[in-house]
Image: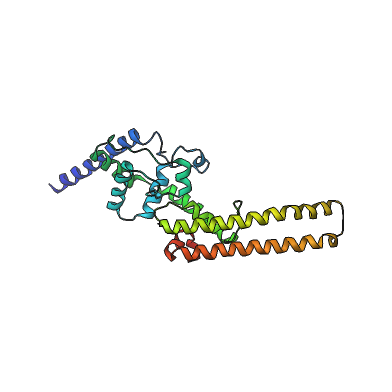
Amino acid sequence: MKRSLLFYIATSALMFAGEGEALVKQHCASCHMLEKPEPEQIPTLKAPAFDAVLFHLKDAIHDKAAQKAFIIDYVQHPSASKSVCESNKVAKFGVMPSLKGKVTPQELADIADYLIETYPHPAFVRMIKEILRNDAMRALRSSPFLINSEALPHMTKLLMQNWDKAKLGLSDEQKSKLLKVRKETLAGIGKIKQALRPLEMEVAEAMIDKEAPKSVETQLKKIAELKLEATRIHLKCIYDTTHILSEEQLAVILPFWE
């Protein structure tokens, strides 16, 4: 009797898993990759691979029942503010179309169960953790004070990437304050870059013409003063940002600071 019951439970689980897999292939596979993506494939994907989606979901929500509830709700009522993926990924792929009315409540439950039990694949977890470790090491080497191509500190760039992520949980008031800081920083650095460009050209031309370094001493002092001012602006940006965010929010974008 006991052996028969165990057999029934096992075969029932396999049957429901099969239904979930079929439903995922029917409703999701046209956009989401079902296999583990290779690093070179990731930039070409139409939507995040399920490995990535479930990796972020399980990172943000640890309870299985809550994970299932999230999937069922999100599939029917998707929005950028609910997403567990980074905001820059949501901006790249867009918000998924709603499946409300296209699948039954039971089908949604079967899809959620299958996704939670199947993803992410262990090989993907190993790969993504290695990528994250490398990213963290690069961030530590360059530090949050790195000025990127957008003329913002590295910390601010990370913040913008996670802008709408539910895990970060920025309030409307915080967003308003942070946007003001960003605008002031970009404006200040923009003026400095305009002033720097002709001075640096003068120095470059003097070197090409084989002039003595003393001939550009004035330009060099002005360049140093402008770069000092740029550093002050970036430090103020970081100071203002860290005082707008909570300690928990800082830990989301800068976990290696702990």
Q: Residue at x 35, y 43 (%)?
A: 78
41 over 252 or under it: above or below? above
36 over 233 or under it: above or below? above
Q: Residue at x 51, y 57 (%)?
A: 180
Query: In this rendering, would 198 be left or right of 40?
Result: right
Indicate the quadrant where residue 95 lies.
top left
Q: Farthest left residue? A: 1
Q: Position of residue 205 (x, y in %)?
A: 82, 51
67 over 230 or under it: above or below? above
Q: Position of residue 105 (x, y in %)?
A: 24, 40
Q: Residue at x 19, y 43 (%)?
A: 7
How are the colours assigned in the image?
A: rainbow
Q: Residue at x 53, y 41 (%)?
A: 40
Q: Position of residue 30 (x, y in %)?
A: 39, 33
Q: Position of residue 89 (x, y in %)?
A: 47, 46
Of residues 212 and 65, the one nearer the viewer is 212
Asked if residue 57 shows in the view, the reply is yes
Query: In this rendering, would 75 be left or right of 12?
Result: right
Q: How many marks?
A: 0
Indicate the quadrant where residue 143 lies.
bottom right
Asked if residue 147 shows in the view, the reply is no
Query: In this rendering, would 78 be left or right of 183?
Result: left
